Amino acid sequence: MTVLAYFGDLPIPSPLLGGLILGLIIVGIVVYLYILPKKNEPPEVNPVEIGIDPMVASGPNSLMGPEVRVYNVPVRIVAIVVAAAGRGHDQLSEETLRTLMENFLPQMMAVIRAHRPDVYRWPGQMSTRGFGQRFFAQANLPGEHGEGSPWTAVAGRFDHQGSGYLIGLVCCADEDNPLGQILVEQKQQWTDIVRIS
């Protein structure tokens, strides 16, 4: 007996039963695609607002520990913002953040202990330029984007262990300076722009 002969003996379903089955299949697909929660996509999280008061200068004059210079101007790091490069990444864990800071710039952990900056973990960001724009807007430096004030902000990309990260530093000097907002275009520029001694 062939397979076709076996199925040939089965009764053909009525059009009503066929329509019912097709309708149930369509409802199942709609529920699966649109109603059930997506497991792979993390919820959209907005970056946490940087909470500094740019009208209250807090330069490095009274700090102990390593000295930080941005383009040879002594500064205190007031806030650090870190995000993974690319959307769909969760906020960084405490361990990942610590490892990243230990490898970001020489002596960075000693600077963090001495300067005690506020640290913000943002969700993944698509591009260095997009991160820079959002970071500079959130930093909200006084005057002409910080120029002519003690405040400066530096943002750019840093790669570590095969992953990309976006880092922003809000810094304050003891005196007014022309630095303002600095976008690190290439990851190798970090050590030219920010020096720790």
Image (cartoon, helix red, strand yellow):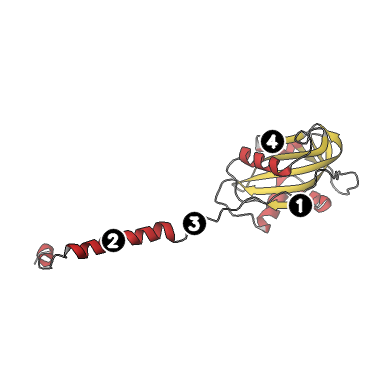
What x and y, as percent, mark residue 41? 51, 55
Q: Residue at x 54, y 51 (%)?
A: 88
Q: Residue at x 11, y 62 (%)?
A: 4
Q: Are marks 3 and 4 in contact (CB under 8 Å)?
A: no
| Outermost residue to the right | 62
What x and y, as percent, mark residue 60? 87, 44
Inter-mark Cα distance, 4 to 1: 20 Å
Q: Are marks 1 and 3 in contact (CB under 8 Å)?
A: no
Q: Quadrant of residue 167?
A: top right
User: Hey, what amino acid is under mark 1?
Assistant: Asp
User: Hey, what amino acid is under mark 2?
Assistant: Gly
Inter-mark Cα distance, 3 to 4: 32 Å
Q: Residue at x 28, y 61 (%)?
A: 23
Q: Are marks 2 and 4 in contact (CB under 8 Å)?
A: no
Crowd band around label 2 with a 10 angstrom C-alpha radius: few (<14), some (14–19), many (20+): few
Mark 4 — residue? 183
Q: Nearer the viewer, residue 119 or 113?
A: 119
Name the quadrant of the C terminus.
Answer: top right
Q: Nearer the viewer, residue 152 or 115?
A: 152
Inter-mark Cα distance, 2 to 1: 56 Å
Q: Are marks 2 and 1 in contact (CB under 8 Å)?
A: no
Decide which of tag 1 and tag 3 comes sooner along the chain.
3
Mark 1 — residue? 118
Inter-mark Cα distance, 2 to 3: 28 Å
What x and y, as percent, mark residue 39? 48, 59
Q: Residue at x 37, y 58 (%)?
A: 30
Observer-side mark, 2 or 1, equals 2
Mark 2 — residue? 23
Mark 3 — residue? 40
Decide which of tag 3 and tag 4 comes sooner along the chain.
3
What x and y, as percent, mark residue 85? 60, 45
Crowd band around label 1 with a 10 angstrom C-alpha radius: few (<14), some (14–19), many (20+): some
